[in-house]
Amino acid sequence: YVQEGFFGHMDVAIIEAVAIREDGSIVPSSAVGNNVEYMDAADRIIIEINEWQDLELEGMHDIYRMPMPGSRVPLPICNPGDRIGGTSIDVDPEKIVAIVHTDGPDRNAPFRPVDETSKAIAGHLLDFLDGEVHAGRLAYDRLILQNGVGNVPNAVLAGLEDSKFENITAYTEVIQDGMLDLIDSGKMSFASATSFCLSPDAAHRMNQEADRYRNHIVLRPQQVSNHPEVIRRLAPIGINGMIEADIYGNVNSTNVAGSKMMNGIGGSGDFTRNAYISSFVTPSVAKDGDISAIVPFASHIDHAEHDVKLIVTERGYADLRGLCPRDRVRKMIDIAAPEYRPLLEEYVEFASKSKAQHTPHDLTRAFEFHTRFLETGSMRK
């Protein structure tokens, strides 16, 4: 949109960097994101030199300028560690109107400690991946991951520490604490992303040892890190969090009860549609059991049932591949919390009496879990 001028004229871009090279190019900090597009589009640029970020980040980046539609060529990335660009962003020096110095740390909250629920979710996901190895569709020495932002996806990475998988790599959007831990343990050899989302402790570790991590991490523009062509070629296992999923596999990532925004969709859509296996992980309940993560009909849909392959809770996993809607229902109810299974079965029985049988729904009751929650504070009857 920015490249095409959809948002109108861009006057000023404010860009964080760790350094400006003698040739005038910019060394990005712990995120590349859309900085290339913003700097190209803006009339004036303000560079914020963040001295809190370690100078050893220089060399970690891989900057590739995406041509406009009509002039694009295939991106020659066949492995997460392949580099296709330079390590800094070249910029017209006439555009730079100010350079501001700061030493402010990234404002990231710590991740929650791994609890029994997260361990169970990780265990079920590993059981699924083991099954894929035994079926000949994966290998223990070739696992490429995409991991979404959040406590549960981050905790799932901890489960890989004691798994049979070795030489794990990642082609993802954001690097979290769990990936640094996998790199430190030797389980993960390389990770590609567009930015970090680290707890304060992990961010400090990154700054202290940036020269070492530079051998295992590359940061790219978001148009490259989330490029469907590359994702489809590398075929990662996508692991993302969610708010809720319905009995047919539609996933809501963004809006509680359909309207109250909890977080943005981020890049999960790019990976859900193009990953080899697109999985979503979540505890089966929230708010001390008052909210079920499995509902009759998702109140907002970010990822349609056609793209969602696997859903995992602490109750098990639902492998939805190759199933018609009616056959997905049993698998989804089996991974719901026990107290909500009778309510889900009651809804299915009622909806199945309708004339439309391919995807049975009764629109007068499809959102009864949500309306009950809004009226009483609980989805329980």
Image (cartoon, rainbow, N blue to C red):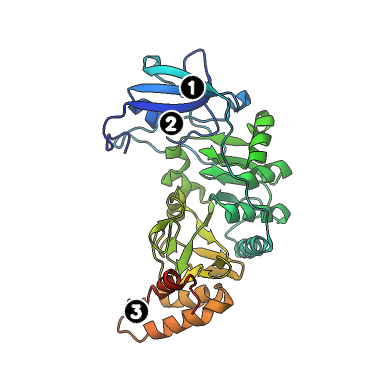
Looking at the image, tell me whether mark 1 or mark 3 is earlier in sequence order: 1
Q: Is residue 131 above or below residue 40?
A: below
Count of marks overlaid on the render = 3
Q: Is residue 110 above or below residue 52?
A: below
Q: Position of residue 284 (x, y in %)?
A: 56, 68
> Mark 2 Cα within 10 Å, few/some/many (few <14, many 20+)?
some
Q: Which residue is mark 3?
A: 362
Q: Between residue 370 and residue 276, name the one nearer to us.
A: 370
Q: Nearer the viewer, residue 264 or 133?
A: 264
As measured in the structure, the alpha-carbon distance from the residue carrying label 1 to the one carrying label 2 is 10 Å
Q: Quadrant of the N terminus?
A: top left
State the mark number for residue 26: 1
Residue at 66% from the left image edge and 45% from the top image edge: 188
**Closer to us: 155 or 74:** 155
Q: Looking at the picture, how far across and down is residue 362, in whole percent?
A: 34, 79
Kindly identify the amino acid type of the residue bearing the numbered disc 1. Ile
Residues at discs 3 and 2 in contact (Cβ within 8 Å): no
Residue that appears at 51% across and 41% down = 78
Q: Which residue is mark 2?
A: 35
